[in-house]
């Protein structure tokens, strides 16, 4: 009887591992389907890279100015 109980326990463990693996795979599938809507546009020239750098710097300056204003605002 001990051999049969070991086999049953082994089968239960394998089923639990498979169930966990299926859950993980389904979660990965959901994550990848959400990301398919987003498209990445490659930077093809130095001019684009410079423009993007300026845009990021400008956005950062705006955020910094907003933070400074919020610190000074008495309301």
Image: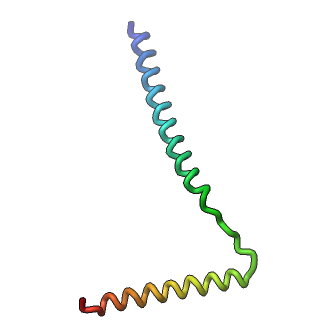
**In the depicted view, which residue is nearer to us: 8 or 56?**
56
Q: Is residue 8 above or below residue 74?
A: above
Q: Is residue 30 left or right of residue 46?
A: left
Q: Is residue 69 left or right of residue 49?
A: left
Residue sitting farthest toward the top: 1
Residue sitting farthest toward the left: 75
- Rendering quarter of residue 64: bottom left
- Rendering quarter of residue 7: top left
Identity of the residue drawn at 44% across and 29% down: 16
Identity of the residue drawn at 68% across and 69% down: 41
Q: How is the image coloured?
A: rainbow
Identity of the residue drawn at 70% across and 70% down: 42
Residue 65 point in image, percent of width and height: 42, 90
Image quarter where the N terminus lies is top left
Q: Is residue 22 above or below residue 73?
A: above
Image quarter where the C terminus lies is bottom left
């Amino acid at each position: 009887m001990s051999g049969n109980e070991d086999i049953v326990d082994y089968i239960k463990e394998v089923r639990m591992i498979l169930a966990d693996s299926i859950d993980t795979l389904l979660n990965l599938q959901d994550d990848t389907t959400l990301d398919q809507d987003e498209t990445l546009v490659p930077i093809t020239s130095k001019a684009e890279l410079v423009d993007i750098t300026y845009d990021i710097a400008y956005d950062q300056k705006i955020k910094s100015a907003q933070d400074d204003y919020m610190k000074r605002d008495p309301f």
